[in-house]
Image (tube, rainbow, N blue to C red):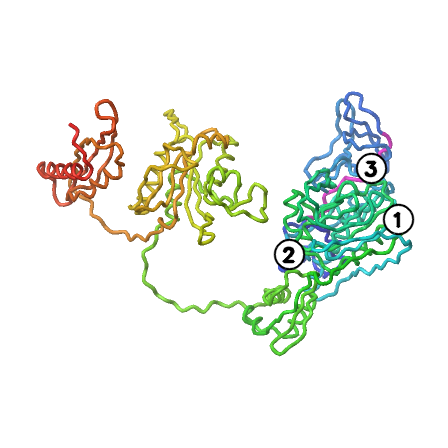
């Protein structure tokens, strides 16, 4: 939240500098993001009076202006659409330097001399965007320095407010905390009480069980909304990041920024009948003030009249009843909507407003009439008019008032580590508006209505520390006794897997645990995903049942940005519903797509395939010393039927690997294939204690054989049969060729094996080698029905 330091000091002035003030705010939990001083930015920028405007002889979009700078008339070429004869605006004279660094020089624009520049608010750094030249009041004196006229010797403080401190989304809320910290009272109070001068009222009906628990409003007649808002009001709004619109709207925004009550004004001539606060009807629609039409859900509270909805409660008004410069008869609304009914509505309707931001966090339930009277007085002062009686509704039983709870001295000491005197406790909390009734073990406490975050004992103890001062809490070192324990076998696990995959060229990603329902449905048609009742976005509406939706979505984003060589991995939770309830399972997933190696001088452009990813996983299992996993061909709805497999441990499926199904690839508009895997992380967290193994000094012997066997027998069975043959000197077996063709029967295949034999104590003799090979062939014949291919 941005605000003017001068505005804050009208409420409380602790007689400290800006830097110390910012430090105090941060220590109070209102973290200061930035402090920006305004006064030094406008040297050479003055108030200019545009005396005449004429077309540029050679440019349709440029105008030649004669500008009075208080001493003489200067010619300036300007392209702003809102430049007009007689207007007062910001004039940067020759030699001035704008906040952007631009230095104003005398120049020619399309052949016409220009000595200076008429400026917009954005060019002066006063706002992020603007529609044209900065418009100053008609009574602004030409030639006066802009900084002096706007009283820009000020500091803009931007604080980051945590969601629990909704009370600090206003000047008064920030001032309350500073008042407690510095032990000085607030310098201002709001005391307006408006006596009605007309009998006009508007009937208000609040239907039961909706968001509204307090609704106040009054008719103001004879308003002149075409006048300019006073400069002090415009400047305070602008320095808070809010654009001035019209006097009535500006007043409602000003009251919200100063005391924290969101408000709205209806043009009463456009309201049919009275005000009705109710739930939206089935199929009901509303055109908002920003011009968008939204379809209203039935759990949304709306402000309505006899013709239909005219606003979303607590979020935004409707376009049909909005105030404009012709509005003369208005109805001013000040209401309380419960946070639980407002939360999520801004996201649902894709509209973020300052009102919604505050109602989501909670507004003081005793503030509505005070704000209504304050805003009424400001409107009467600026726009004139006559105020009617207040229309009021209040449902006391639903007011969000805190129940009293116990605050114990012993608990304070335990959490803070020191004894805080009763007088200090009562002083700290009393300044924050907490009511305390003393009892034997402490106090019975009741939080003020504007503090929705104070509901339990620990909340108040935190407030004591915050106001008392963290710097006053003694520093103590933990009392630890050294305890020596035996070193346990360290599980290799996830960290080793991360290191290995990064070494293999993968990049780790972290995606949301909630994913696009449509994408997940394509990958897992029977996934039974857990839906979210309040998603942050309509395309992130379900919990993931696998890491694959996030990985595939990341691949899509990369391909859309012309990044075609992709290697990704992620570890995290998947959420699977079962008969036992919701299961959270830790898994490791990954994806590769594009070229196998980066482009280089060899010209190799081979695309990664199923076996490349399978090889990476086999290397990972070897690195982690997990030797009881194997791959078995299987089909998955998201994977290519001929390029997919389960990862098995014994007979249990612990993972999947495969190429994305071609139909799915087409449906997702992926321009290239992708190979993907996922595996249960528990399997990778086995303890492994490294053991010394002697490296043989003697040469290894290799013998290659080819066997013919049934084509249905998997390679793993062949490897296991060889490794479990009991041959003494066998170190390793390698499958280096598989043949299917005319030279053997159709139902058979030929497999070429490399047998590596070695002994650690001597060189093997030829007879020993031949005997070992013969033993292996015999095992293959007996177990698999294989025959030696000659």
Whichever of labels 3 and 1 marks the residue nearer the N terminus, that label is 3
Q: Specify whether residue 51 is painted magenta.
A: yes
Q: For mark 1, what is the residue?
A: 221
The residues bearing labels 2 and 1 have C-alpha atoms spaced at a distance of 41 Å
Q: Horizontal placement of 306 versus 623: left or right?
A: right
The residues bearing labels 3 and 1 have C-alpha atoms spaced at a distance of 36 Å
Q: Which residues are magenta?
A: 36-52
**Mark 3 secondary-structure assignment:** strand
Residue drawn at 70 percent across, 49 percent down = 279
Q: Is 665 placed above or below 159 here?
A: above
Q: Quadrant of the C terminus?
A: top left
Whichever of labels 3 and 2 marks the residue nearer the N terminus, that label is 2
Where residue 507 sits: x, y (%)? 44, 40
**Mark 1 secondary-structure assignment:** strand
Q: For mark 2, what is the residue?
A: 30
Please report contact status of discs 3 and 1: CB closer than 8 Å, yes or no. Answer: no
The residues bearing labels 3 and 2 have C-alpha atoms spaced at a distance of 40 Å
- Res 786 → quadrant: top left
Where residue 216 sits: x, y (%)? 79, 55
Please report contact status of discs 2 and 1: CB closer than 8 Å, yes or no. Answer: no
Of residue 596 and residue 14, the one placed in the foreground of this image is: 596
Disc 1 crowd rating (10 Å Cα; few below 14, some 14-19, many 20+) is many
Q: Horizontal placement of 90 versus 652: left or right?
A: right
Whichever of labels 2 and 1 marks the residue nearer the N terminus, that label is 2
Q: Horizontal placement of 662 versus 198: left or right?
A: left
Residue drawn at 80 percent across, 30 percent down = 76
Between label 3 and label 1, give the one nearer the viewer: 1
Residue drawn at 63 percent across, 50 percent down = 33
- Can you name the residue that lies furthest to the bottom here? 440
- Res 124 → quadrant: top right
């Amino acid at each position: 939240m941005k605000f003017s330091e001068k505005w804050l000091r009208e409420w409380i002035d602790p007689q400290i500098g800006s830097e110390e003030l910012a430090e105090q705010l941060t220590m109070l939990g209102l973290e200061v993001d930035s402090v920006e001083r305004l006064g030094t930015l406008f040297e050479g920028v003055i108030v200019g009076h545009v005396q005449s405007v004429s077309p540029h002889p050679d440019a349709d979009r440029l105008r030649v202006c004669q500008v009075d700078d208080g001493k003489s008339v200067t010619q300036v070429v300007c392209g702003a659409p809102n430049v007009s004869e007689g207007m007062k605006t910001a004039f940067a004279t020759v030699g001035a330097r704008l906040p952007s660094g631009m230095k104003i020089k005398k120049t020619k624009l399309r052949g016409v001399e220009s000595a200076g520049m008429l400026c917009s608010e954005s060019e002066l750094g006063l706002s992020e965007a603007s529609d044209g030249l900065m418009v100053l009041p008609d009574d602004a004196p030409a030639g006066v320095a802009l900084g002096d006229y706007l009283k820009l010797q000020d500091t803009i403080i931007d604080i980051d407010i945590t969601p629990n401190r909704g009370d600090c989304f206003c000047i008064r809320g920030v001032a309350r905390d500073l008042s407690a910290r510095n032990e000085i009272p607030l310098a201002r109070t709001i005391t307006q009480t408006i006596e009605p001068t007309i009998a006009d009222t508007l009937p208000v009906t609040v239907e039961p069980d909706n968001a509204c628990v307090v609704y106040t409003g009054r008719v103001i007649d004879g308003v002149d909304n075409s006048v300019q808002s006073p400069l002090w009001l415009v400047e305070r709004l602008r320095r808070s990041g809010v654009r001035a619109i019209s006097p009535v709207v500006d007043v409602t925004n000003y009251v919200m920024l100063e005391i924290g009550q969101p408000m709205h004004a209806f043009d009463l001539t456009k309201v049919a009948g009275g005000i009705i606060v109710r739930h939206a009807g089935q199929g009901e629609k509303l055109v908002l003030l920003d011009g968008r039409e939204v379809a209203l859900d039935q759990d949304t509270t709306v402000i309505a009249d006899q013709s239909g909805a005219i606003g979303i409660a607590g979020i935004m008004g409707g376009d049909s009843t909005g105030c404009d410069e012709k509005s003369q008869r208005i109805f001013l609304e000040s209401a309380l909507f419960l946070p639980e009914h407002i939360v999520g509505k801004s996201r649902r309707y894709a509209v973020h407003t300052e009102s919604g931001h505050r109602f989501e966090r909670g507004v003081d339930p005793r503030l509505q009439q005070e704000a209504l009277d304050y805003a009424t007085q400001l409107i009467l002062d600026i726009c004139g008019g006559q105020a009617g009686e207040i229309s009021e509704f209040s449902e006391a039983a639903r007011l969000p008032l805190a129940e009293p709870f116990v605050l114990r001295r012993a608990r304070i000491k335990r959490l803070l580590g020191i004894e805080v005197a009763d007088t200090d406790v009562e002083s700290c909390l009393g300044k924050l508006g907490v009511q305390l009734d003393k009892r034997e073990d402490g106090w019975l406490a009741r939080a003020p209505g504007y503090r929705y975050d104070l509901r339990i004992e620990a909340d108040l103890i935190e407030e004591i520390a915050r106001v008392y001062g963290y710097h006053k809490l003694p520093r103590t070192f933990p009392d630890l006794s050294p305890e020596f324990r035996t070193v346990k076998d360290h599980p290799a696990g996830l960290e080793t897997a991360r290191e290995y995959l990064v070494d293999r060229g993968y990049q780790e990603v972290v995606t949301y645990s909630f994913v696009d329902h449509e994408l997940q449905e394509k990958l897992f048609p029977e996934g039974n995903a857990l839906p979210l009742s309040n998603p942050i976005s309509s395309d992130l509406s379900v919990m993931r049942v696998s890491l694959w939706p996030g990985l595939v979505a990341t691949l899509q984003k990369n391909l859309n940005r012309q990044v075609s060589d992709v290697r990704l991995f992620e570890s995290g939770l998947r959420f699977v519903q079962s008969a036992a309830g919701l299961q959270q399972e830790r898994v490791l997933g990954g994806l590769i797509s594009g070229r196998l190696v980066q482009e280089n001088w060899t010209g190799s452009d081979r695309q990664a395939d199923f076996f490349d990813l399978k090889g990476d996983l086999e290397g990972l299992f070897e690195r982690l010393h997990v030797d009881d996993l194997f791959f078995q061909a299987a089909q998955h709805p998201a994977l290519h039927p001929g390029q997919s497999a389960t990862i098995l441990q014994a007979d249990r499926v612990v993972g999947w690997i495969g190429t994305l199904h071609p139909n799915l690839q087409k449906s997702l508009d992926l321009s290239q294939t992708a190979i993907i895997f996922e595996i249960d992380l528990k399997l990778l967290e086995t303890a492994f204690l490294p053991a010394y193994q002697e490296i043989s000094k003697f040469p290894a012997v290799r013998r290659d054989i080819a066997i013919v066997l049934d084509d249905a027998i998997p390679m793993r069975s062949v490897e296991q049969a060889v490794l479990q043959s009991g041959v003494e000197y066998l170190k390793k077996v390698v499958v280096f060729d598989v043949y299917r063709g005319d030279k053997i029967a159709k139902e058979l295949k030929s497999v070429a094996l490399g047998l590596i034999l070695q002994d650690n104590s001597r060189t093997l003799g030829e007879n020993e080698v031949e005997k070992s090979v013969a033993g292996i062939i015999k095992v293959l014949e007996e177990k698999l029905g294989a025959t030696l291919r000659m």
